[in-house]
Image: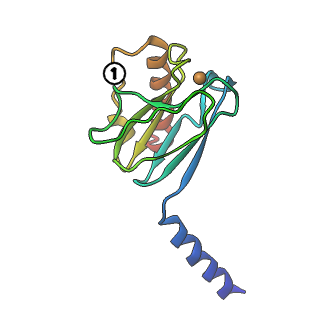
Amino acid sequence: MKLALLALGAVLATTAAHAETYEVRMLNRNETGGMPYEPDFLRLAPGDTVRFIPTIPSHNAATMPEMIPSGAKPFKGKIDQQIEVSFTVPGIYGVKCIPHYMMGMVMLVIVGDEPVANVAVPAGLPPEAKKRLQEIKARALAKEDPR
Ligand SMILES: [Cu+2]
C-alpha cells in the first residue's frame, strides 16, 4: 500500500512538471465586484495554458497592449468564444474584456518568477481598469509576499 502511494506520488510529481491548464470564468459579478474574471490573478510556469470560459454571455479575453512582455504574442478572443491560450514568454500580462474594459474588467497574469511588486499599472488606463488592476496587485502581493 505504501509503495503504491509512493508510486502515485511519483506520477503526480512528474505530471506537475508538465504544462498545466487553468480555467478562468468570465462573469458579471462575484465578491470582488462587477465584471470580474475569476480568478483575476494567475501565476503560471512558461508553457501553461489558460482556458477563458464565457460562463456568462457577452465577454471576451484579449491582451492589453500596455501590459505584455516584449516578444509575447497578443491574443483576442471573440465575444462568447471559449479560448485556450498558452503563455510561453515570461513576464507580466494584462488581460481585458473589450466590452467591459471601461467598467474595469481586467485580470493579471504573471508567467515565471517576476515578483508581483514589479507589476507597473500603466497610468493611461481607464480609471476603473486601473483601480481593478491595483486591487488585484494588492491581493496578489498579500497572497505571495505576506509581510
Ligand atoms: Cu466582459
What's the amino acid at mark 1? Pro
Outermost residue on the left side: it is 70
Seen in the picture, residue 21 relative to 77 is either above or below; the reply is below
Q: Residue at x 47, y 18 (%)?
A: 129
Quadrant (top left/top right/bottom left/bottom right) for the N terminus: bottom right
State the image coordinates of residue 38 (x, y, percent, origin top left). 61, 35
State the image coordinates of residue 143 (x, y, percent, origin top left). 51, 41
Seen in the picture, residue 101 relative to 40 is either above or below; the reply is above
Seen in the picture, residue 27 relative to 99 is either above or below; the reply is below
Quadrant (top left/top right/bottom left/bottom right) for the C terminus: top left
Seen in the picture, residue 124 relative to 38 is either above or below; the reply is above
Q: Residue at x 65, y 88 (%)?
A: 3
For residue 6, which quarter of the picture? bottom right
Query: Relative to 140, is 73 on the left or the right?
Result: left
Q: Nearer the viewer, residue 29 or 19?
A: 19
Tell me which image quadrant ligand 1 sits in.
top right
